[in-house]
């Protein structure tokens, strides 16, 4: 599988989330690395959410509907200039999955 296919595969978010969760669970048992627990838990959550929020049908400005299958294609197609992945995801979740979003 080439790099493009890996990035464009929505299941990679789930695999990445599972990997981060495994690291988190390991680090919880190792006091020497406890400063990494919050980081691995955070990124695990980020990738679980990316996996669950897609695929998603989006009504485009031209009136057509496009089904986004993975986060990278959604982000690259709909981000605003200068917007990063975390900010885009925060806004997307707030706008489309309010039940799990903090409305700040």
Image: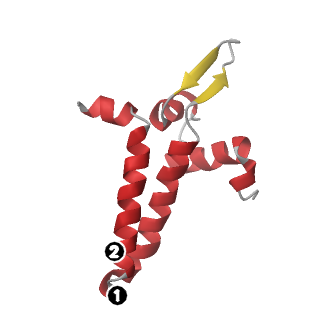
- Where disc 2 sits, the SS reads helix
Tell me the tag on residue 66.
none
Colour pattern of the rendering? secondary structure
Q: Position of residue 87 (x, y in %)?
A: 58, 49
Would you identify the image quadrant in which residue 5 lies?
top left
Q: Which residue is mark 2?
A: 26
Q: Say if 4 sits above or below 43 in the image.
A: above
Task: Specify few, some or many for label 2: CA neighbours under 10 Å numbering under 14, 14-19, or 20 or more.
Answer: few
Compared with residue 81, is residue 20 higher up or lower down, i.e. above or below?
Answer: below
Q: Tell me if residue 65 can be seen.
A: yes
- Residue appearing at x 45%, y 35% in the figure: 72
| Drawn side of residue 93 relative to residue 14, left or right | right
Image x and y of residue 7, in percent: 36, 36
- Eyeballing the image, is 9 above or below 63? below
Task: Indicate the quadrant containing the C terminus: top left, top right, bottom left or bottom right.
Answer: bottom right
Q: Residue at x 39, y 33 (%)?
A: 9
Can the viewer see residue 84?
no
Judge left or right: residue 14 versus residue 33: right
Residue 82: percent from left, percent from top: 53, 41
Left or right: 38 in relation to 29: right
* Secondary structure of residue under mark 1: helix
Picture coordinates of residue 1, whole percent (x, y): 23, 31
Taking the view exactly as shown, the residue that stands out farthest to the bottom is: 31
Which labelled disc corresponds to residue 31?
1
Q: Is residue 46 left or right of residue 102?
A: left
> Circle 1: is it few (<14), some (14-19), or many (20+) Cα within 10 Å?
few
Disc number lying in front (2 or 1) = 2
Decide which of tag 2 and tag 1 comes sooner along the chain: 2
Q: Is the residue 49 above or below the residue 68 in the image?
A: below
Query: Which residue is found at the position 63% from the left and 25% from the top?
Result: 57
Q: CA distance from mark 2 to mark 1?
A: 10 Å
């Amino acid at each position: 599988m080439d790099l493009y296919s890996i990035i464009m595969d929505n299941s990679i978010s789930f695999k990445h989330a599972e990997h981060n969760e495994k690291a988190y669970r390991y680090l919880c048992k190792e006091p020497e690395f406890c400063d990494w627990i919050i980081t691995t838990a955070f990124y695990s959550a980020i990738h679980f959410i990316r996996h669950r929020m897609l695929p998603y049908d989006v009504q485009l400005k031209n009136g057509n509907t496009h089904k986004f299958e993975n986060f990278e294609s959604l982000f690259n197609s709909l981000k605003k200039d200068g917007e990063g992945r975390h900010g885009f995801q925060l806004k997307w979740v707030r706008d489309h999955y309010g039940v799990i979003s903090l409305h700040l």
